[in-house]
Structure formats: C-alpha cells, structure tokens
Amino acid sequence: MAALKRVVDSRWLFHRDISRTSASRFFKTSSSCRTVMPAWVIDKYGGNDVLRFTKDARFPIINYPNEVIVKVCAAGLNPIDVSMRGGYGASTMSMKRDPLNLKQKENEFPLILGRDVSGVIMECGLDVKYFRERDEVWAAIPPWKHGSLAEFVVLSANEVSLKPKSLSHAEAAAIPYVATTTWSALVNTGGLTKDNCAKKRVLILGGSGGVGTFAIQMLKAWGAHVTVTCSQNAERFVRGLGADHVVDYTAGPVDVPLAALDKFDLVLDNVGGSTERWALNLLKPWSGAKYVTLVTPFLQNTDALGIADGMMKTAATVASKALKYLVKGVHYRWGFFAPSGPALDEIREMVDAGQIHAVVEETFTFAQVPQAFAKVENGHARGKTVVQIDKWDT
Ligand SMILES: NC(=O)c1ccc[n+]([C@@H]2O[C@H](COP(=O)([O-])OP(=O)(O)OC[C@H]3O[C@@H](n4cnc5c(N)ncnc54)[C@H](OP(=O)(O)O)[C@@H]3O)[C@@H](O)[C@H]2O)c1
C-alpha cells in the first residue's frame, strides 16, 4: 500500500522544470504567514565559532508540489555536519543547489546544518498524497538542502517517512541519516537483502559509531553473522547490539586477528585510510564478495579540483581500483548516503518490531548546538548525538 501511494507522490518528477512563479499555482496557500524562524546558521566556513543562533532565519517555502514543510522536534548530528561547517563538499553542494550558477554565492549562506529530522508535517504541496498535515515523520536531509537545526525544514515527500510509533522524536532523530547510508551501502551497493543475508558473513570496520551501531542491528535482524572492529572499551556495547564477534583495533594491527577468521561475504568500511590495503584480502574470492567503503575522496576531489576535474579524478580512481580487485575475484565499491523515504518505511517496520533500537549517546537542547557539534567533533562516538529542538504541543 505504501509503495502504491509513493508512486503517486513521484509525480513531482514531471513538474521539476517548472519555474518558481509558474509553480505557485500547484500549491495550497501557506497556513503560516511567518517569514522568519529560529535556527542555528553559519555565514562562513570554519570552527565551532561560526555557528550563530538567529531568530530571523528565512522561513522555508514549498517550491515544488511534492514538498512538505516539517516542524522540527529533534535533529540528529553526523560527522558530515562538522565537516560541512568547515567547508567540506562546498563545491558539490553549491552546484546541486544552483546548477547553472545563476546566483553564485548568494544562496550558500546563511546555511543551516543538521541532516536528521524527526518532527510533524505542517504543510503539504498539492501533489502530496501519502502524507497529511500533523503526521509525525522522520527523514534524512540531503546535504545540499538546508538542515534540521531550525524550527522548520522543507523536504521532498519522497525523502520523508512516517516516524516509528515506538520511538520518541529524540530517538527517531538518531536514525535516518545513518540508516539510509547503511541501506544505500549494504542493499543498493552491496546487494544484501533481508532474504539473502541468512548465511552471509559480514565484517563492519568501525562498529561503535552512528553507522556501525545501526548496521549491526539491521544485519542481525536479517540473520547475517556480524564481526565488528572497535575499541576495547566498546566491546560490550557492540555485543549488546548483536555483534557475534568483536575485534579490538587498539590491541595491535587489526588485520592479523581478522585474517585468522573465515573469509567474509561483505566488508563495510566506516574507517578508511590504510584499511583498503588489507580489507579486500579478507573477502571470499570468486564468490561475488564485496568491499564497500563509506570513506571516499569524492568531495575532497571536487573541493580541490572543481566539479569537472574532481569528478574525472574520482571516476578514474574508482574505476582503476575496481578493476585491480576484480582480477583478484572480489568487488571494490564506494558507498554513499542516499535520501530515501521508502527505505525509511522499511526501517520503521524493523524499529516498531523491536529489531532495531535508537542508540542515542547524548541529547542536547537547542541552546546547546555548539556543544553538540563539539561532542561529534571529539570523535569516539558510541551511537548518536541528538538535539531536542521543540516538544510538539498538540
Ligand atoms: N559516504 C557517505 O555518504 C557517508 C555517509 C555517512 C558516513 N560516512 C562516513 O563513515 C564514517 C563513519 O560514520 P559514523 O557516522 O559512523 O561516524 P561516527 O559516529 O563518528 O563513528 C566513528 C566510530 O569509529 C570508531 N573508530 C575510529 N577509528 C577506528 C578504527 N581504526 N577501527 C575501528 N573503529 C574506529 C570510533 O570510536 P573510537 O575512536 O573510540 O574507536 C567511532 O565509534 C565517517 O568517516 C563518515 O564520514 C560516509
């Protein structure tokens, strides 16, 4: 049923080329006359000191008939928010926001960060059939859009999903970005599904952070055997989430104990760096086994070389690595976050069935956003950092 209604929502694709002015006839009249809202913004890239609280951030508007405005109850932070605060990905994000570069820097700042949202729909574009005002929803916000460290955010209905009933907003805000990234990496890139995981051996490099804690739970819900690397002091924590085997990466070169284990069907790499030198040797050769890394130089390349040269370099790098490992019988892949309401629909079912729990390490108030950034920047995550924006008052 959900899938059927999502097809109706996807009609927005046919309206994508309409201008803002001509598009206005597709929308309901805004229920709000507000033009400004409270938000944390940045006006330039830098350290934590560039975060600025304002009561006068521009109120989001519906630009396309498939969009919804969500009142933010809780926001989740991810390492990408800290990186974007410092300018990471700026070239690619500017290109996505303004493909023809018509406004140049004009719409880059003030920029609102925050990739996870749990909240309540306040207004729907006219093509939105799957959601109604006052629906409680969750979503992962693409990095080229304004984020959730604000009272309201505008999103495509295709990015949004009904929130799990079993979770509070603060808990729900801990899941969407890491969940849709994990889904994209394991399902879309890695080829795993709930029906083919039962006998698979999966290794997660970096199991104690946001992505790792979600990936362990999803893979265990699908019946995989899960091995995890993490610090010694996180061993009990990841075992509590279901990890079958844990290897302490702080005890010495981690590839040595891993090489003594049976080979794996898939390696999910949340760590990067030197891991590529040995992790592909841990895969079962000539069996379709895949190494999927989330730590890629794609945005560094476009930041350093510009869009065209950066993309050329990226394509050349990934193609040569994929070829190098293909002749050894294993698959080398890069995984990326992909916004997806339908993926969150499936994840909601696992959450409400008790198969996946929110792993909230620390919750901050809206006034404490700089402290929340400092927490994420400090690293050593054990799950997720969440900001409580507002308690929705019915
Ligand atoms: N490509 C994409 O679209 C995409 C999307 C999401 C995330 N990512 C990337 O994926 C990575 C993981 O994201 P995340 O949200 O899970 O980050 P996170 O919440 O900060 O977690 C990172 C975890 O890795 C652990 N760790 C650090 N070094 C390690 C090592 N050598 N071996 C094993 N564990 C180690 C850290 O704990 P200790 O330091 O205490 O060990 C921490 O628990 C980040 O680099 C992020 O940028 C990429």
Image (cartoon, grey):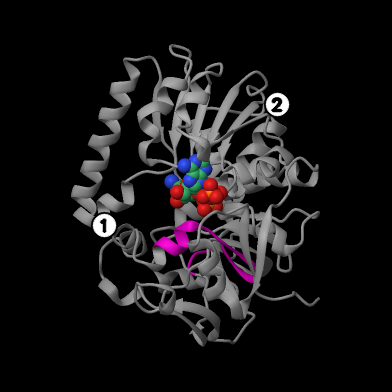
- Image position of 32 (left or right of 314): right
- Extreme residue toward the top, this view: 286
- Image position of 187 (left or right of 199): left
Work out whether residue 45 or residue 344 is closer to the camera in this orientation and state it: 45
Work out whether residue 168 or residue 134 is closer to the camera in this orientation and state it: 168
Q: Verify CB contact (< 8 Å) between mark 1 and mark 2.
A: no
Decide: few, some or many residues near mark 1? Use Cα within 10 Å; few <14, some 14-19, many ≥20.
some
Q: Position of residue 113 (x, y in %)?
A: 48, 68
**Marker count (numbered):** 2
Q: Residue at x 58, y 41 (%)?
A: 207
Dot 1: element: helix
Q: Position of residue 8 (x, y in %)?
A: 61, 49
Tell me the residue that label 1 is attached to.
Answer: 303
- Label 1 C-beta lies within 8 Å of the nearest ligand 1 atom: no
Is residue 345 positioned above or below 108 on the image? above
Is residue 61 positioned above or below 189 on the image? below
Is residue 278 positioned above or below 185 on the image? above
Q: Residue at x 71, y 47 (%)?
A: 348
| Residue 78 part of the magenta-drawn span | yes
Label 1, label 2: how many angstroms apart (C-alpha)?
Answer: 40 Å
- Amino acid under disc 1: Asp
Q: Residue at x 29, y 52 (%)?
A: 300
Residue range highlighted in magenta: 63-83
| Residue 387 part of the magenta-drawn span | no
Dot 2: element: loop
| Label 1 vs 2, first from the N-terminus | 2
Regarding residue 130, the answer to whether it shows in the image is no
